Image (tube, grey):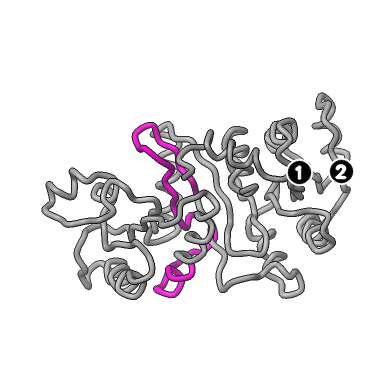
Amino acid sequence: MVSSFNELLALVQNKPTRRVALVAAEDPDLIKAAAKTQALGLAEFILLGDAPKITDILENTELPFEIIDSRSPAADSIRLIQENRADLLMKGKITTGELLKEVLKKESGLRQGQLLNHIAAIESPHYHKLLFISDGGINLSFDEQTFEYMIRNISDYLKRLEIAEPRFGMMTLVENVTEAIPETVIAGNVVEKMKAEFRIEGPIAPDVALSAKAAIKKGLESDIAGEVDVFLMPNTTAANHLVKGLVTLGGCKHGGVIVGAKVPIILISRSDSVEAKFHSILLGLV
């Protein structure tokens, strides 16, 4: 079971070298993260975008990169996947919407399941393993079916991290179902439908999910308290704010990847550090 980014790195080091199409690569931090990955022999990068700008950034980089001058880097990157010249995609200086517009086209051949969703991985100095949070970047609102698809996508992905039975928590404000808080109703319905197949509880608040002591103090019985692997947040804003708060104020390490497509899509924020971009690459290379 992978419980830290160092363990994730060790896992990836034992896998074949992959080819990453970096979509709109005109960014120094992106290229630093790519160079670090390539120097470790984990992947080879194909840089697509404004070739003169990319070349200027690479001026002090000794590592060889393949550069493709492209005015449509998302479409051209997908073409590399189709031609088996690349194994996965990485978002660069392009909006998530622009990239996903090309990915979701039927002719791209990248649509696999019913839904794509983003997973953020958090390594906290105050938690004993990686915590995964979804969905802070792709789906804007979640109904019961969206949660069901996310649970299946995440479960399939986490098996690659040797997490065979991830513990899912349906995050809400309180632990009881109440009509006044609609996400508790959704959580209760999803848990009832999925509990025979997955280790899932909800509605559940974050303090209980992260601490068995909190569950005891609240008089709650829980099989996942203090051992949760996945926070399923009630909406994208909550997920996004939680991740950014943990990173900015909590000193947590993080990375992110989109799952549910035929190939992994490494998704980073423009404000992410080189380290976070590197972590995201590792999550994709799994």
| Number of marks | 2
Using the rendered view, name the quadrant where residue 245 is placed.
Answer: top left
Q: Position of residue 212 (x, y in %)?
A: 22, 46
Circle 2 packing at 10 Å, graded few (<14), some (14-19), many (20+), is some
91 or 193, nearer to the observer:
193
Quick one: label 1 or label 2, which is nearer the N terminus?
Answer: 1
Q: Is residue 273 magenta?
A: no
* Span of residues in magenta: 120-149
Q: Do labels 1 and 2 touch, CB within 8 Å?
A: yes
- Using residue 13 as the reference point, say whether residue 200 is left or right of it: left
What numbered label is drawn on residue 25?
A: 1
The disc at residue 67 is 2
Residue under the point 42% across and 53% down: 239
| Vertical order, 157 against 122 (above or below) | below
Residue 151 relative to residue 260: left or right? left
Say what secondary structure mark 2 lies in.
Answer: strand
Q: Amino acid at mark 2?
A: Ile
Within 10 Å of the Cα at label 1, are there few (<14), some (14-19), or many (20+) other Cα atoms?
many
- Residue 90 image point, x, y percent: 69, 49
Residue at point 63% right, 50% down? 266
Q: Is label 1 in a helix, a strand or a loop?
A: loop
